[in-house]
Image (tube, helix red, strand yellow):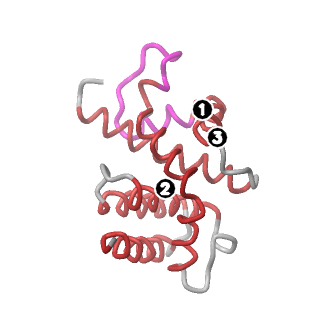
């Protein structure tokens, strides 16, 4: 895609679809291995969701649907976020457990945990994504998919993680 706006749309769609994948993975209690390959198998099952999100975010009409993944998703980002989570899932979950006050990965709603895992991976392990962007996107996803007040504690957790990682 040549237009920078198209790249932004791809990234937004990729985050949201990856959050849905992590949610499904958490619900089914699958192992945290081969995340990228599993994700690639997951995407065709929700092709309609991918395209709907792409259009919702302002993406252009797609002429060749057989190439929809290349046109709608940011493959580089998806590989990097998959690696970051797979390589650091225990540490990511420690951050959640440390800052979730009276909650844990096991007791928080799975969708909230999925959003937190993505944002913490971006904050702690993906230096090309500004912390503010990771936090803002997580809050937006929480407003869309979580309970009414979830975005507040998600923002609080991410603020604490950001402070801790910036000290390192």
Question: Residue sitting at 36 percent across and 32 percent down?
Answer: 59
Q: Main secondary structure of the magenta part?
A: helix
159 with respect to 105 (left or right): left
Q: Are marks 3 and 1 in contact (CB under 8 Å)?
A: no
**How many numbered marks, from 0 up?**
3
The tag earlier along the polypeptide, 2 or 3, is 3
Q: Work out which quarter of the rendered image holds the N terminus and state it.
A: top left
Q: Which residue is mark 1?
A: 40
The secondary structure type at the circle numbered 1 is helix
140 with respect to 91 (left or right): left
Q: Who is closer to the viewer here, 63 or 110?
A: 110
Number of other residues with Cα within 10 Å of mark 2, as a class: few under 14, some 14 to 19, many 20 or more: many
Q: Which residues are magenta?
A: 49-69
Res 37 → quadrant: top right
Q: Which residue is mark 2?
A: 118
Q: Which residue is mark 3?
A: 34
Res 56 → quadrant: top left
Image position, residue 68 (x, y; %): 48, 23
Can you say whether 125 is above or below 36 in the image? Answer: below
Image position, residue 19 (x, y; %): 54, 51
Number of other residues with Cα within 10 Å of mark 1, as a class: few under 14, some 14 to 19, many 20 or more: some
Let me know if residue 32 is in the magenta part.
Answer: no
Question: Residue sitting at 51 percent across and 45 percent down?
Answer: 83
Image position, residue 127 (x, y; %): 32, 53
Q: Who is closer to the viewer here, 34 or 19?
A: 34
Q: Are marks 2 and 1 in contact (CB under 8 Å)?
A: no
The tag earlier along the polypeptide, 2 or 1, is 1
Q: Residue furthest bottom?
A: 102
The secondary structure type at the circle numbered 3 is loop
Question: Residue sitting at 49 percent across and 47 percent down?
Answer: 16
Let me know if residue 63 is in the magenta part.
Answer: yes
Question: Residue sitting at 53 percent across and 15 percent down?
Answer: 66
């Amino acid at each position: 895609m040549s237009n920078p706006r198209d790249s932004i749309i791809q990234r937004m769609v990729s985050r949201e679809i990856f959050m849905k994948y992590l949610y499904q993975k958490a619900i089914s209690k699958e192992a945290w291995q081969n995340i990228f390959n599993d994700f690639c198998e997951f995407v065709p099952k929700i092709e309609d969701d991918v395209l709907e999100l792409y259009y919702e975010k302002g993406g252009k009409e797609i002429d060749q649907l057989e190439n929809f993944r290349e046109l709608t998703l940011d493959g580089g980002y998806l590989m990097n976020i998959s690696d970051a989570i797979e390589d650091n899932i225990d540490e990511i979950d420690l951050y959640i457990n440390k800052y979730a006050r009276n909650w844990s990965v096991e007791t928080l709603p799975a969708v909230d945990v999925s959003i937190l895992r993505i944002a913490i991976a971006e904050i702690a392990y993906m230096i090309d994504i500004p912390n503010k962007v990771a936090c803002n996107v997580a809050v937006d996803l929480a407003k869309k998919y979580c309970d009414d007040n979830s975005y507040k504690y998600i923002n609080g957790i991410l603020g604490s993680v950001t402070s801790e990682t910036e000290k390192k």
